[in-house]
Amino acid sequence: MAANPSHLEAVNPVVAGKIRAKQTIIQDKNNTKVSGLLIHGDAAIAGQGIVAETFTMSQLNGYRIGGLIHFIINNQIGFTTSPQYSRSAPYSSEIGKIVQSPIFHVNGDDPEAVVLASRAATEFRNTFKKDTLVDMFCYRKHGHNEGDEPSFTQPLMYQTIKKKKTVASIYAAKLISQEVVNTKQVDFIKDRIWSDLEKKFEKAKNYKLKTKSWMGGQWSGLSLAPKDPLRRGRTAESEKSLKEIGTKISQIPKGFNLHPKLEKFNKSRLTSIKSGKNIDWSFAEALAFGALLKEGYRVRLAGQDSGRGTFSQRHSVFYDQKSEERYIPLNHIAKNQKQFEVIDSFLSELGVLGFEYGYSLADPNTLVLWEAQFGDFANGAQIIIDQFIASSERKWMQMSGLVMLLPHGHEGMGPEHSSARIERFLQMAAEDNVQIVNCTTPASYFHALRRQIHRNFRKPLIVFTPKSTLRHPNNVSSISEFTGRSSFHRLIEDEIKNPKRIIFCSGKIFYELDDFRTKNNIKDVKIVRIEQIYPFPFDAIGDVILKHKESEILWVQEEPKNMGAWSFVKSRIRHVLVKNNLTKKVHYVGRRPAAAPATGISKRHSTNQQLIKELALKSSLKRVIKERSGVSFMKFKNLPKE
Ligand SMILES: Cc1ncc(C[n+]2csc(CCOP(=O)(O)OP(=O)(O)O)c2C)c(N)n1
């Protein structure tokens, strides 16, 4: 039984994902050993878009599970709403037709017919490996809940229902008339069922949650997260192994017609792995995946166009230019390696994220990642984020090691495609429910990914990922940052000693600030990158602040003031200051509050970006304080030249 939130139908793709994982674990290639049953209401199945998404995925590579059985308890009403207001189609089951599913309409007053229809549906699913539906026409005896008065809204229907005999008594009368049972036997069966239910009801009152009982099967050996804030895990990999992986994934089989640009791509990867220098973001990701596969963990990455990568950065699948044959280098690194499954998902966020979340529940030993094309599209999956990812450990003791990759950053591309809504993820973070990182180096990302598997607990990981800075010349790591005693660090501090000012920031703005600092030969401003924003690294930030008690402290972000991490970090940095008896403040530098995440005018974007850098690195504290509501180039008469 899947844990099911109140949001009707949201559980559908979660169930499908769980089934896919279970089938993969036991190598149920024909989908004969694991299947699922979804129970729907007639209003919900007709109304909720996630139903269509779950049907759409049912026949796709990467999502196929050999069909689900859908059972509609069609009581011909949705809370107080009649069918004519619930759907435009004649039947609530119409949605099944998008994959030509057979649909069995059956009278709920006839239990034998219901059993027959259900058996036929099951047999069809098992034979043809496709979704099937049973649409059981019935009625709801009382209101939506026991206290509701149904005749406020459906008076005629409820006059009829009141007069109707129950299904049990109709069926009992039929069986008695056929001399299959007698009245005494019917009463005996009824009593037995009632007393069984009563006993279980009483037992449920004393049910105590046992952590252990949730940690069985695939989860055995795992436990709840420790209090230790570092939680590093052993994530480094030997240089020899990384070189082996890096070399293997940058090669193609003989006779494979690789795109000429990808020959260069491979060549450059070979050069960097050989020299141990300039390992970029996507290469670091491939190395993280490769190391896990070699160690015996599966990796499953799904997202729109994830195989190639939205920014043409990943190229985890090569296509023969003559035959279009696919070659996935990560599946050719070692003899006993596990499988890398990379899926160009269909165009869904809600259903797809639900599926991957479900997968992660059933298999904690696969690194499961969902990638948004751009981070802002994650809001299409908000129900899965709120109802499952953020809250499921607290609500249901259900852990998940799911990774969400969300491209984020202001690059003058306009209000769309700029923001993964960092602020929303931070707002939902509490009680150690998720991990939110904004890595600024390939090695930091490498360790964050490997940490997901190499610790004995699981927590969802939200990663804000780069776009233009995928190729920033400084966004590279050396092999020593992946090997030996290297690990994930929640903060990255630069070498500046005795700074007049400390800038705390997170993510891609670091590179712009750093470039500006170098260009302007600024030597007294320290930049500290918060790589992990949640759980918030209070201790590490305290260490930096205490080392430089006299320094001014700024928070710098490129997002508008009502967005980004500011509203989350300000009270936390203040807390660190107060705790250490420091009376100074943390000051804001960034854009002023805005309705849309970014401007649609590229020039305005770059001017504001420039103002942020100037204010953060060159201006006096007095000026910073004056601009505390955020920069906006509209206010400046003499615009700086671009
Ligand atoms: C996504 C979502 N929207 C609204 C609700 C509130 N709600 C709960 S039950 C219900 C009616 C459901 O009707 P139907 O699907 O026919 O199922 P029934 O309760 O009749 O079995 C509604 C609107 C909800 N739980 N989930």
Image: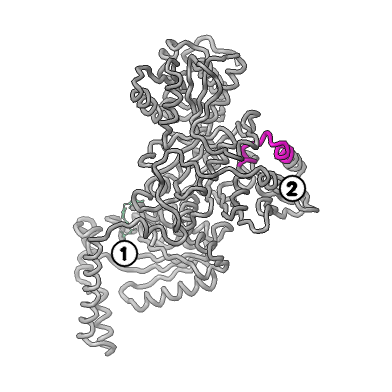
Residue 536 lies in the magenta-colored region: no
Q: Quadrant of the C terminus?
A: top right
**Element under disc 1:** loop
**Element under disc 2:** loop
Name the mark on residue 251: 2
Residue 414 in view here: no
| Ligand 1 located in image quadrant | bottom left
User: Left or right of 536: which side holds 286?
Assistant: right
Region of the chain picked out in magenta, as a range: 268-284
Dot 1: within a 10 Å radius of its alpha carbon, few (fewer than 14), some, or many (20 or more) residues? some
Q: Quadrant of the N terminus?
A: bottom left
Q: Say what amino acid the circle numbered 2 marks.
A: Gln
Residue sitting nearer the eye, 281 or 293? 293
Q: Decide if ligand 1 comes within 8 Å of the CB at mark 1.
A: yes
Query: Residue tagged by mark 1?
Result: 75
Identity of the residue furthest to the front in this view: 485
Position in image of residue 356 (x %, y %): 49, 52
Most frequent secondary structure within the magenta stretch? helix
Q: How is the image coloured?
A: one colour
Position in image of residue 468 (x %, y %): 60, 32
Residue 281 lies in the magenta-colored region: yes
- Mark 2 against mark 1, which lies toward the viewer? 2
* Residue at image location 47% in from the left, 27% down from the top: 559
Within the image, what quadrant is residue 421 found in? top left
The answer to which of marks 2 and 1 sits earlier in the sequence is: 1
User: Left or right of 306: which side holds 250?
Assistant: right
Dot 2: within a 10 Å radius of its alpha carbon, few (fewer than 14), some, or many (20 or more) residues? some
* Residue at image location 64% in from the left, 43% down from the top: 314
User: Is 51 situated above or below 617?
Assistant: below
User: Left or right of 475: which side holds 599?
Assistant: left
